[in-house]
Structures are given as structure tokens and as C-alpha cells.
Image (spheres, helix red, strand yellow):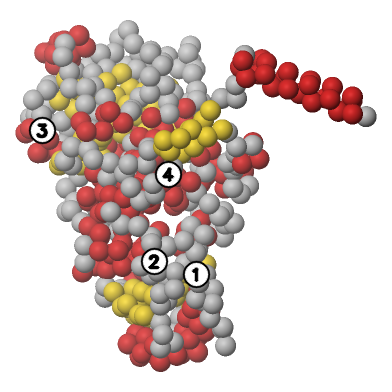
Amino acid sequence: MGSRRFKIFLGVSIFSIIIYCNKSVLPDRPKIPFPKVSYGSKNSNSTDPLNALALPHDYDEKPVGDEYCEERYGLSFMEPFRDSLNAYCDPVTSASTMECLHTRVNPNHHDPFCILNNVMLDRQGGNHSFTLDCNLRNFTADPGKNEPKDLYSFHKYMFGEGPRAAFVNHFIHTNTTNPMPDKTLKALSTCKSGSKSKNWKIVINRDAHGGRHPWHSLMEIFSMYITLDIMRSTARPLDGKPFFSPEDIPDTQVIITDSHPDHNLYELWNLLGFKSVMRLPDYLASENATCLDNVLFPLAGGSNTMWHGDWRLKDCRNSRFLDIFIDRIMGHYGIDHTRKSDGPIVVTFIDRRGRRKFRDQAKHVKRFQENFPNVKVNVVDFADIPYSEQIRIVAKSDILAGIHGAALTHAMYLPPQSSVVEIQPYKLKHRGFRNLAKLLGHRYFNTHCFEDPTADPNWHKVTDIAIEDEKFDDVMKAAVWSVYNSRTLGIDIS
């Protein structure tokens, strides 16, 4: 027995010495940096100084939710774009180029974004200040991808924004049937071989609400950043390099082509640290170059999947690219979700001053405070304060409550595991804020006001809405109780 143990010991010792002296006996497992993500900061590329061995594959990130949810709200949404690159201009007969990437997540139409090169700038052209010389290639002989075959057949979004609107409203499109003057053509041909402004120009034609509607504005801004992220992960056919890289950011410029006034969210067009956002007339006055490369029509706000199916209940519970967008906004303003784990519960009521005002709001809030004396209550009219301050208020709240309206978009900035209360007009079945809350991991509580025979039947135009005391008390009690044990409060519900 002792001899057998000695042989085993000797064998193990010799094997260990061989490994120590010659590490090539066993292959090295590749070392992968374990990322240390800094949420709420622009600087989220830092990694731990120590490399860690890869975790077992069981820890690999897996899609959350079913295929429907993943292709709309997960990273799978971005993948089809990379396989859809389509050239629109005939390379022999066109002085300009236009390449578009599409998705068909909406079954009714394609949603594109487009990259234009060799575009001529006409400072005297007024609204139509850009010239694109593009003879459509022969799609019959060279079918390419299954996307729209005509620039004017791109989808026309409901509120007049997106690539088609930017193209139709601000570009002169010349081709064999609509030739440009010889002088212009000669100048554009010279552009092809001459020096050009290669900094990215992102051309934005905002929707008819013009920044007045927070949800519409956020969807447009969000879609632009999704576009840039797709471009960062899509290789150019000529050199295999990404269409857009972090090095491009400081020289990238957003050009607003509409004449709508600025509003609170205007500054978010410059979320990543681009050059100052410019209106088209100011850009025309300041740009020295006549020839432009890297002109971008980003995805339309109306293409954003957060806007799809607002009237349908969805069981989607996670969106990675929504999380990233929120982190970027919070980081831009230097705000985080940190709150005291044992601090008081904070409820923020949205104080609407225009349509759909909350009738007897002061009475309801006073009774709520009497029922929950240890809960801190904010009653806030978001229209009167800067956007950064709006986010700071919500980021320190546990519950966001209000009448149905765009301000409930602020649920994006609630800390994790918060609650949202929505009081809807009579019979309204809008699901958008419920679906948003679910994607963010928040609890959602909904109730309706009572019927008012004198109210306008169009809920958009309702002046004010009213709710029974008991119904208001019940929905607010449910929301408060839901956060009693979400932190370290440990409060009994009765």
C-alpha cells in the first residue's frame, strides 16, 4: 500500500515539475479583461487593471425575452442592418454616392438610414442647399438587397421627419431625367477628386412637433444614436473599417434643417460631445467647403421600436440599447440613480397645467399625505424647469405619478425597481407607458378617471379629468406598498 502511494506521489511530482519548466505542455487559456462598467458616465470604456480568466459559458449574456422582444428591444435589433447595405447610385454615371442600411422589423415598410458622399453645398440654395447627382443603378440586373428601389419610395413618417423628408425638403436630386446644369456638374465632378469636408454631417429634419413633445423628441434623438452605434459595428466594403468610430465624434456636427424653436431637449442632440449643433442657415454661412463627404440621414424617430405597438400589451422586460441611451443621458448631466437605501419614500406628482389637468389635485395630494405622513411628496410642473433638473428630481424618486401625458416618459430616469402610476382619461387604452415601465423593470399601476358627459370626446383635447377619491387612494396605496420592501425599509403594509 505504501509503495503504491509513493508511486502516485512521485508521478504527480514529476508531472508538476514538467509543467512548471515547460508551460507549453498545456495550452494557455486566453485571458479576457473583465470589464468594469461605469454607468451614468461618458467614460464607460475603462477596464479592470487586472485581467481575469473567462467565466464559464453559463455566464454568457443571453437574450432576455422571446424572439419578438429580442428583435425589437434587444441587440438583435441592430444585426439586420449590417447585412442590408445597399448602394443606390450607379457608379459609372453618377458623381455622388448614396448607401442605405435598412431593417424590416416593421412588417409594413422598411426603416432606412443613409450615408451620402460627394455632395455639393449650394450656399445660395435656400432650403434646397445640397445637391446629389445620383442615377439609380439597374436594380433588375443587380438586385442587391430587398429594399425600396427608389429614393422617393422610402417610408413617409407620420409627423414629417426622417430620411425621406430630409432628402425631399433639402436636396436637389439630379439624374439623367433631371440633369444638373453643366457648370454645377463640372463643379461636382471636381469634388470627386478634390478636397472635401470629411467630417460627419448629420442632417436632421425634426417632426412637426419640433421638440415641444418630449416623447417625440427623445425618439428622434434616440434613433440617431442607435444609427451611430450600428455604424460603429458595420464595416465599410472598401477597407473593412467601421463607418463611424469614436475618433470621429469631436468633428461630427448635427445640422437641424427645420425652423421649429429650440426646447428643453435640444441639447441632447450633442450628447456624445459633437461640435455645436447648428441650424441650416448658420451652417451654410460657416462651412467653407463646397464638397461634402460623410453626410448622414439617421433613422427616423418614428422608426424607433419604443414607439411601435403603443396600443398593445407587451411582455417585453428588458432593452439593452434603451439602458445604454439612458446611461448616456444621465452621464451627460452627471446624474446617477444613487439614493439612500433607508431614506424616506419619495413620490413625484406630475403637475399638468395645460390640457388634461387633474381636477381637485390639491385635495387628492393633501389626503394622500395624510394617509402616508412618512412619504415625501413633490408636485412638479416639468414645463417650468430645465431638463437636467427634471431628471434630477425623478432620479431621486421612488414613484412617478400623473395623468396620461408625455411627462410620464420621465419614468426612464427613475431608479431601478421603482413604480409608475398612470391615470388615464375615461376608456383610453394606451399601453405605451406601461410597456416602457416593464422594459425598465419598474412596477406599473393604472386607473381611469370617471366619465364626464360634458368633456370633449377627443381625449387629446380634454380640459381636465377627475377621479373618485377611493379609486385614487387605492392606486396610490398599491404603489406605495410596492416599494415598502424594495430597499431596506422593511415596512409592514398594515
Q: State the CA–CA distance, disc 4 to disc 2.
A: 19 Å
Q: Secondary structure at mark 1?
A: loop
Q: Earlier in the sequence, mark 4 or mark 2?
A: 4
Q: Earlier in the sequence, mark 4 or mark 3?
A: 4
Q: Secondary structure at mark 2?
A: loop
Dot 4 amino acid type: Val
Residue underneath mark 4: 37
Q: Is residue 143 left or right of residue 12?
A: left
Q: Is residue 404 left or right of residue 6?
A: left
- Can you tell which mark lies on residue 284? 3
Dot 1 crowding, Cα within 10 Å, few <14, some 14–19, many 20+: some
Q: State the CA–CA distance, disc 1 to disc 4.
A: 23 Å
Dot 3 crowding, Cα within 10 Å, few <14, some 14–19, many 20+: many
Q: State the CA–CA distance, disc 3 to disc 1.
A: 54 Å
Q: Is residue 429 visible?
A: no
Between residue 120 and residue 149, name the one nearer to us.
120
Above or below for 9 versus 471: above
User: Residue at the location (6% across, 33% down)?
Assistant: 285
Where's the C terminus, which quadrant? bottom right
Residue underneath mark 2: 339
Circles 2 and 1: CB atoms closer than 8 Å:
yes
Residue underneath mark 1: 487
